[in-house]
Image (cartoon, rainbow, N blue to C red):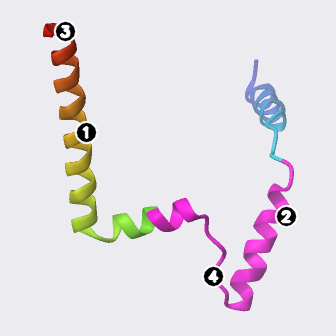
Amino acid sequence: MNAEDKYRAWKDRRREIRIADGFADRVMDQVLQHQRGRPPQRRDSQRLLEFVSARPVVKAALVAAGAAVGLLRMALMIHMVLG
């Protein structure tokens, strides 16, 4: 198999990738919104993620809450096993 055959095989494999319906429409909508000067609309989860990642205190609070929940689960498991 020479280089040309390998390239054609690679192109054929890449051609089989499926793109989600409406992908081009979503991209063009965002391009048009950007050109008009409006920021693209974000999902609530994206806004929440940006809010959390921009504030170290919120990050620390979430880590502390996760640790507390984890310790509570461990305590409940120990209680169930030994109780």
Instruction: Name the N-terminal-most of marks 2 and 4.
Output: 2
Considering only order in the chain, which callout, 3 or 1, is on the residue closer to the N terminus?
A: 1
Distance, label 2 to label 4, CA atoms, is 17 Å
- Which numbered mark, 4 or 3, is in the foreground of this view? 3
Q: Which residue is the site of mark 3?
A: 81
Cα distance between the residues tagged 1 and 3? 18 Å
Alpha carbon separation for disc pair 1 and 4: 37 Å
Q: Which mark is residue 39?
A: 4
First to last magenta residue range: 21-48
Query: Is 42 included in the stretch rendered in magenta?
Result: yes
Q: Is residue 24 magenta?
A: yes
Residue type at the position of mark 1: Val
Labels 2, 3: front one: 3
Residue lying at 77% horizontally and 36% vertically, measured from the top left:
14
Which residue has dot 1 on it?
69
Quarter-of-image position of residue 34: bottom right
Q: Tell me the quarter of the picture where residue 23 sits.
A: bottom right
Mark 4 is surrounded, within 10 Å at the Cα level, by few (under 14), some (14 to 19) or many (20 or more) other residues, namely few
Name the secondary structure under disc 3.
Answer: helix
Residue 14 vs 27, above or below: the answer is above
Q: CA distance from mark 1 to mark 2?
A: 42 Å
The location of residue 59, given as percent across then percent down, is 27, 59
Q: Quick one: label 1, few (<14), some, or many (20+) residues within 10 Å? A: few
Which quadrant is home to the N terminus? top right
**Total numbered labels placed on residues in the image:** 4
Q: Amino acid at mark 3?
A: Val
- Furthest toward the bottom, the residue is 37
Hey, which quadrant is residue 81 in on the image? top left
83 relative to 47 in the view: left or right? left
Q: Residues within 10 Å of mark 3 (few under 14, many from 20)?
A: few
- The residue under label 2 is 25
Judged from the image, the secondary structure of the residue bearing numbered disc 1 is helix
